[in-house]
Image: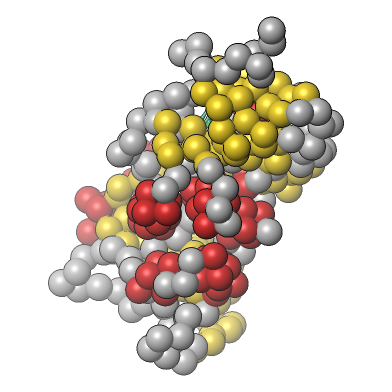
Amino acid sequence: MNSIESPLQYQEVLVIGAGPVGLTSALALRLKGHAVTLIESEPEGRDRPGSRAIFIHNETLKLLEQIQPGLGMLIASHGLVWPTKRTYWRERQVFVRHYPAPKPNILPPFSSLPQVKIEQMLLDACKQAGVEFAWNMPVSNVETTPDGVTVTTESGQIWAAKYVVGADGSRSMVRRALDIPMEGSRSKNSYIVADVTEDEDHPLPLERVFYYDHPGVGRDVLFVPFVGGWRVDLQCREDDNLDAYSGIEGVRQWLPKVMDPKYLDRITWVSTYQFLQVLARDFTDKNHRVLLVGEAAHLFAPFGARGMNSGIADAIA
Ligand SMILES: Cc1cc2nc3c(=O)[nH]c(=O)nc-3n(C[C@H](O)[C@H](O)[C@H](O)COP(=O)(O)OP(=O)(O)OC[C@H]3O[C@@H](n4cnc5c(N)ncnc54)[C@H](O)[C@@H]3O)c2cc1C
């Protein structure tokens, strides 16, 4: 008897990964009437550092509204809409656009809030809809047959399902287990990203500002406000010594050259990334039992806010 015939746990659909894309997939499937269990490697209530996907597009809010009326509005109500966008070439402003204030009871053009807050609202919606959760359970293998999928966890549990949604992020175990390669390119230069909390007594104007060749650092810098703080993004050059700019010590060197030094005591997260344009060769296995979604399937540069937004679109498609 093989493991599909003698599973410890059986489900119609298993979703693997409780990031924004896995949570949206589980919610969308559950609201269509399917029994869904979501398996996540980390414990419930884990610390998810950094603002990450702070920009949620109007189209994404609409999609969430479509699967659960009120959900897009709820997320938007916790975010902010910056009314001005400016671009500078060194000290000279070369572009400015002002947006009208969003109308009440209508989805705004976008909403800016930390990813962890979006995930919390998706998690609450999943629980209310009756999605089952298995936390703290890293998946270690996935096998498919024409009839279904067997999922093994590191703790030795075996789950069987008709279908699996692989939403386990950029280093996807599901994708690796199915031997599906990623193909594409990676930028040679790196980007440093720092979150700082706002000084609520003396806040900066809510403006998204991009500098080509910022006069303080001679590199491109992007400032994006979100609820409670700012994302500051520094674009290093290919020949930069990354160690001089990255990590908390590196950021402490360049941040006061682009922002008031008071923000040095307000740094909450620092990370480094490269621009990737990478796709999984297939989004499904040979038996069409597993679907890869979100960063398990594709990796895009954060500029344009395509990461979480495109993943949520996958999940609802
Ligand atoms: C600096 C930065 C800024 C960004 N800004 C934006 C933005 O403004 N807008 C935007 O749309 N996107 C943005 N992104 C991208 C966004 O954060 C990601 O696209 C998004 O988190 C991907 O969601 P996901 O659910 O596919 O994967 P993840 O968020 O990576 O979730 C994967 C989940 O799977 C779990 N998991 C992993 N392995 C296993 C396993 N073996 N078994 C079980 N569970 C497992 C993980 O613990 C995790 O919970 C940004 C990213 C960065 C780094």
Please give left or right for residue 39 compared with residue 255 in the image. Answer: right
- Give the colouring mode of the picture: secondary structure
Disc tally is 0
The quarter of the picture where the C terminus appears is bottom right
- The residue lying toward the viewer, choosing from 164 and 178, is 164
Q: Is residue 35 visible?
A: yes
What residue do we see at 51% from left, 61% from top?
221
What residue do we see at 57% from left, 48% from top?
34
Percent x, y of residue 62: 55, 73
- The residue lying toward the viewer, choosing from 119 and 186, is 119
- The residue lying toward the viewer, choosing from 10 and 43, is 10
The quarter of the picture where the N terminus appears is top right
Please give left or right for residue 176 compared with residue 96 in the image. Answer: right
Percent x, y of residue 16: 55, 35
The quadrant in which residue 117 appears is bottom left
Percent x, y of residue 134: 42, 31
The quadrant in which residue 145 appears is top right
- The residue lying toward the viewer, choosing from 294 and 146, is 146
Percent x, y of residue 31: 52, 57
Q: Is residue 181 visible?
A: no
What residue do we see at 59% from left, 72% from top?
59
Please give left or right for residue 26 compared with residue 287 in the image. Answer: left
Q: Is residue 113 above or below residue 253?
A: below
Q: Which residue, as the protein is rendered here, is positioned at the far top?
A: 1
Q: Which residue, as the protein is rendered here, is positioned at the far left?
A: 201
